[in-house]
Image (tube, rainbow, N blue to C red):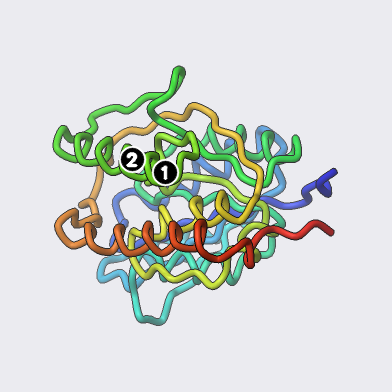
Amino acid sequence: MAAPLQLLSIVIPARDEEGCIASTVEHLDLELRLRGVPHEIVVVDDGSKDSTWTILQEVLKKIPALRPMQNPGPHGFGRAITYGLDAMTGDAVVIMMADESDDCRDVVLYWEKLNQGHDCVFGSRFVKGGGVIDYPPLKYALNRAANFFVRLLFRHGLNDTTNAFKAYRRTVIDGIRPILSPHFNITVELPLKAVVRGYSFTVIPITWRNRRHGVAKLKIREMGSRYLFVVLYVWLEKYFARGDYMKHEG
């Protein structure tokens, strides 16, 4: 039986999110306090050129659970997440976006599912009970094609592998190192490694809405080859590493 969890870390990478970072942290902290979830909110400022860092300092004055930090560089979405994972003190973690696209109530569901003994909890926007609001049509089509390709390769039953919003026990994060992805391809590296290395997981429906402030950081044209590299890297581990990196009990 998995050990009971004591503290949930939420790692949020942020780059030029002055329009929404305060409300993201405030809504998240309020929801977790109301639901009695012990937590810390690790926001990693990834080289913002706007007032994101200044705003975080102001929010810190009223939310003690906030742990703002700056990634000194090199920068990148994946590097910021890894920086946060290295700094977190919790025995479980949820990776969450800074733009309020992820639902705070789903973070509570993740915590509850992890406490049932699962190593990982993967949210899906594309199962019964899940949903998306204002999803750009081109991005939607590319998302479904990419996830179909990954599902075909790994036969793991997941249909939303590319979504960053997922939860892991610390033992999983430690067990899937080293983390290679410097950019958005970390969103597929973490869950695929966890599955391939034998960690247990469950899938729950989640909701997502398009950002209302700021500009999306994902550049689709730049990411195709990077996603493919990580997917094939983990696929090679699955079929050729002979279980050398599998989860060990105890």
Tag 2: amino acid = Asn
From the viewer's side, name the closer residue of 234 and 23.
Answer: 234
Tag 1: amino acid = Thr
Q: Which picture quadrant has residue 80?
A: bottom left
Q: Visible in this render: residue 140?
A: yes
Q: Does residue 233 sit above or below 6 in this rendering?
A: below
**If the image is split into quadrants, where does the C terminus sit?**
bottom right
Residue bearing the label numbered 2? 147
Q: Could you say where residue 207 lies in the image, as x and y percent from the top left? A: 41, 29
On screen, residue 88 versus residue 134, left or right, reads right
Q: Visible in this render: residue 63?
A: no
Q: Could you say where residue 150 lies in the image, as x and y percent from the top left? A: 36, 45
The residue shown at (20%, 52%) is: 215
From the viewer's side, name the closer residue of 66 and 185.
Answer: 185
Q: Could you say where residue 240 lies in the image, as x and y percent from the top left? A: 51, 63
Q: Could you say where residue 223 lies in the image, as x and y percent from the top left? A: 23, 59
The residue shown at (22%, 57%) is: 224
From the viewer's side, name the closer residue of 241 and 136.
Answer: 241
Q: Which picture quadrant has residue 231?
A: bottom left
N-term mark: 1 or 2: 2
Residue bearing the label numbered 1? 161
Q: Residue furthest top?
A: 128
Crowding around mark 1 (Cα neighbors within 10 Å: few <14, some 14 to 19, many 20+) is: many
Pointer 1 with pointer 2, Cβ within 8 A: yes
Secondary structure beneath dot 2 equals helix
The residue shown at (42%, 39%) is: 102
